Image (tube, grey):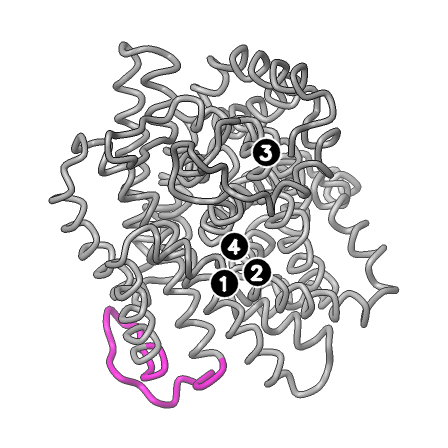
């Protein structure tokens, strides 16, 4: 697998080079300016609108809350537990700072892309709704840009099938199960390409694939119904666990924040005068932090607008504000808790063995960090983390199937035959996901995420005037907000 990992890392470095990072941050900054800092000025109103009832008599299939939960089901996943750990292991504590920056700017991006998705959505005669960046590009930018819409839809289907939707999630689940039930790999089921796989991994993978298949075949209504129950429940459990870590280590939090800021700008390396290393440290932190931030909250990726477009509402701005709360919940709250726990636990966990560390990755790093921070034998902590990760990742599998199907539905012009066949391929990808390395599946996800984000961000920049005008028009009509 080393050769595959090296090949994927080379592609990842190109896709997530400086141009993509600048594009994503610039898009967030432009949307913040166009919407007059809506993530700051209308945050309270946005959270208030989460539980607003669906608007009867208007096109759409979901309430705002169900759409937000469907979007959160896709965003709150392994990125929050495993993704943060891999970002810190690869880019240092400074990666968390760049995740924050991406999230703060990305909140405005999430608002804009979801608002535009409702504004430009298409409603069939039977009430079936299809919307997302592909229609935003085609209808907002004009037919001559349809090639860009097609490109986004192709990348979206790829991301679901090969990256963020399937392999990363099931890989995280089975790694967590194996970490709890067979951490020493004492019960091997088989070996492949020099890697041994335990019975815990095999059985866990089969169970998750089976239950995911049952829900996926049921379509959007079943996915949103499951998400509306599971997402709030799992978020509360994980937040409680994260708060327990922070409360138990209150005195260590200031030092953790200091390390994050120093690492983000390479201060430690600067003191040594190694400017080449300084630049690499900063770019690594930026690349991994922003990439994992996008992986986690999906702001700018163009996925959440697909769910938002199905909301029963006649006011795009309202649902745009509701959806932007997802970025706050996902990254600024949940990812921050994970990152602080890992940093508080100590650098010897994530540093490579060559410099005196254990070099832990993925769920093993997060489990070790939480266990160290909370003390005790760590077994109960690992079990609770496993359960959280199972819920997180399982709902992400469901949410991304929906996104991918909508991308494919756009490409096939509504022909559901290929979509139904795609569902089985999607389930197959879940089945084989546990047998790839953690680095490989996350790198594949990073690549496909980056490819999705590029056409979506281009469309947001081009349509920034529409975003500003639509937002201003809404608040001119409803000075205090209609939510």
The residue that appears at 67% across and 63% down in the rendered structure is: 239
Judge from the rendering whether residue 251 lies leftward or rightward of residue 322; answer left or right: right
Q: Are marks 2 and 1 in contact (CB under 8 Å)?
A: yes
Q: Disc 4 on helix, strand or loop?
A: loop
Q: Is residue 129 left or right of residue 250?
A: left
Q: Position of residue 253 (x, y in %)?
A: 82, 59
Which residues lie in the magenta part? 180-201
Q: CA distance from mark 2 to mark 1?
A: 6 Å
Q: Are marks 4 and 2 in contact (CB under 8 Å)?
A: no
Check contact, mark 4 vs mark 3: CB within 8 A. no
Real-space Cα separation, disc 1 to disc 3, in angstroms: 26 Å
Specify the quadrant that holds the C terminus. top right
**Residue 13 screen position, x and y as percent:** 43, 37
| Mark number, residue 106 | 3
Among the two numbered marks 1 and 4 on one chain, the one whose residue lies closer to the N terminus: 4
In the rendered image of this protein, does residue 439 appear above or below residue 281? Answer: below
Left or right, 177 with reference to 98: left
Disc 4 to disc 2, C-alpha distance:
10 Å
Q: Secondary structure at mark 1?
A: helix
Foreground mark, 1 or 3? 1
> Does label 4 or label 3 sit earlier along the sequence?
4
126 left or right, relative to 451: left
Between residue 202 and residue 222, name the one nearer to us: 222
Q: Which residue carries the number 1 mark? A: 229
- Residue position for label 2: 232
Determine which residue is flagged by label 4: 76
């Amino acid at each position: 697998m080393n050769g595959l990992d090296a090949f994927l890392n080379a592609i990842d470095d190109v896709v997530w080079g400086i141009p993509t990072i600048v594009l994503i941050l610039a898009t967030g900054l432009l949307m913040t300016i166009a919407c007059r800092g809506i993530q700051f000025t209308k945050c309270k109103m946005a959270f208030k609108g989460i539980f607003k009832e669906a608007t009867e008599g208007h096109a759409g299939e979901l309430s705002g809350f169900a759409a937000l939960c469907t979007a959160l089901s896709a965003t709150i996943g392994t990125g929050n537990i495993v993704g943060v750990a891999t970002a810190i292991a690869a880019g240092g504590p400074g990666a968390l700072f760049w995740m924050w920056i991406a999230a703060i700017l990305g909140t405005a991006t999430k608002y804009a892309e979801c608002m535009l998705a409702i504004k430009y959505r298409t409603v069939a005669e039977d009430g079936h709704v299809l919307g997302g960046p592909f229609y935003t590009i085609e209808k907002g930018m004009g037919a001559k840009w349809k090639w860009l819409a097609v490109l986004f839809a192709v990348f979206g289907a790829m991301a679901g099938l090969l990256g963020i939707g399937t392999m990363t999630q099931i890989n995280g689940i089975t790694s967590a199960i194996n970490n709890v039930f067979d951490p020493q790999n004492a019960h091997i089921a088989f070996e492949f390409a020099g890697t041994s796989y335990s019975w815990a991994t095999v059985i866990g993978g089969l169970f998750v694939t089976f239950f995911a298949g049952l829900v996926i075949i049921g379509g959007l209504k079943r996915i949103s119904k499951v998400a509306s129950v599971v997402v709030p429940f799992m978020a509360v459990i994980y937040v409680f666990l994260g708060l327990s870590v922070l409360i138990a280590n209150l005195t260590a939090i200031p030092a953790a924040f200091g390390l994050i800021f120093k690492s983000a700008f390479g201060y430690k390396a600067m003191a040594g005068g190694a400017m080449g290393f300084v630049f690499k440290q900063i770019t690594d932190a930026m690349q991994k932090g922003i990439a994992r931030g996008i992986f986690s909250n999906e702001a700018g990726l163009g996925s959440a607008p697909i769910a938002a477009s199905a909301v029963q509402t006649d006011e795009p701005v309202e649902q745009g504000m509701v959806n932007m709360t997802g970025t706050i919940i996902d990254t600024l709250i949940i990812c921050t808790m994970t990152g602080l726990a890992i940093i508080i636990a100590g650098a010897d966990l994530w540093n490579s063995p060559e410099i005196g560390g254990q070099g832990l990755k993925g769920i093993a790093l997060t489990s070790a960090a939480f266990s160290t921070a909370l003390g005790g034998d760590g077994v109960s902590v690992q079990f609770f983390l496993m359960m959280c990760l199972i819920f997180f990742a399982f709902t992400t599998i469901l949410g991304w199937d929906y996104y991918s199907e909508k991308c494919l539905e756009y490409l096939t012009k509504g022909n559901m035959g290929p979509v139904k066949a795609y569902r089985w391929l999607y389930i197959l990808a879940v089945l084989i996901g546990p047998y790839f390395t953690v680095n490989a599946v996350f790198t594949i996800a990073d690549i496909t995420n980056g490819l999705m984000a590029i056409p979506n961000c281009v469309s947001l920049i081009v349509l920034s005037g529409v975003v500003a005008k639509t937002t201003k028009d809404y608040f001119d009509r409803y000075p205090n907000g209609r939510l």
